[in-house]
Amino acid sequence: MKKIAILLMLTLVTSVTYGQNKKTKKMLAEIEGQWSLDDNGNFSYTRIVEVPEIKSKDEIYNRALNYFVYNYGNGKSVIQTQDKELGRIIGKGLYKDVHIGISLITTYVDCWHIVRVDVKDGRARIILTLTEYDKKIVGGDTPPSYSSLKVKQSFPINPKGNQKTVMGKAFYKSHLSAIATLDALEKSIKEGNTSKELEKDKW
């Protein structure tokens, strides 16, 4: 009986560590084709934002910079580059607790990302790259363990990666967070960071 219990426990741990459940497969199938790898094997998005009504490169730059000031000016999220002459802004941010996997152990996953905006008259290009996961594993009486893993080294980018269910869901939710960031940044470039009414020129 004791051997059977140990065998069942090992099977469960193996499935938690290496397996991928049906829900995760469905989630990943839902976003298939919506992402791609760049030349460095990183998970990246590119979006071109056309704003022909705003002729000035400086105005588009300032709107993009204001987005970063509102969203990347505190905590672990920071503005790394702001070059008005070149028309480039780069920020590094963290999607905190992008996924929390609970089973025999609890795995907290954060996802680091880099956002770059290049500005020209009438348009902007946004490049967002998911770079690295920070993981905290908690379980039993042992102290929490911490690790970092490149997104490209983890499942599903790496089909042989561990914790397929946890990391598959972390990947899916990181994808949704990246899309939300692109949408918010595009809205800020087109409409400003508060509202058109508040940011109108005549006041």
Image: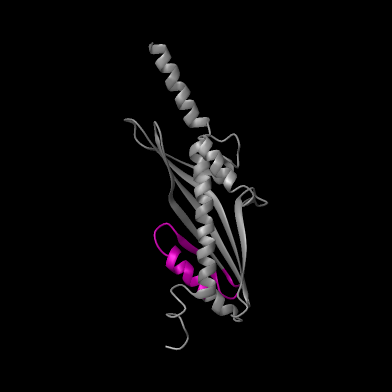
Whether residue 203 is visible: yes
For the residue pair 37 and 26, the one nearer the viewer reads as 26
For the residue pair 117 and 81, the one nearer the viewer reads as 117
Q: How many numbered marks have been drawn onto this rendered protein structure? A: 0
**Residue extending farthest right:** 39
- 191 versus 185 height, above or below: below
Picture quadrant where residue 118 is located: bottom right
- 48 versus 60 height, above or below: above
Where does the image place residue 130, in percent across and percent down from the top left?
55, 52
Q: Residue at image x 56%, y 36%? A: 161
Is 52 included in the stretch rendered in magenta?
A: no
For the residue pair 149 and 10, the one nearer the viewer reads as 10
Query: In what quadrant of the picture does the C terminus appear?
Result: bottom left
- 122 versus 180 height, above or below: below
Q: Is residue 18 left or right of residue 122?
A: left
Picture quadrant where residue 13 is located: top left
Q: Residue at image x 53%, y 46%? A: 171
Q: Which residues are magenta?
A: 63-88
Where does the image place residue 18, in percent across and percent down from the top left?
52, 31
Where does the image place residue 185, in percent across and percent down from the top left?
52, 66
Whether residue 81 is visible: no
Is 79 included in the stretch rendered in magenta?
A: yes
Query: In what quadrant of the picture does the N terminus appear?
Result: top left
Q: Is residue 138 left or right of residue 149?
A: left
- 59 versus 97 height, above or below: below
For the residue pair 110 and 2, the one nearer the viewer reads as 2
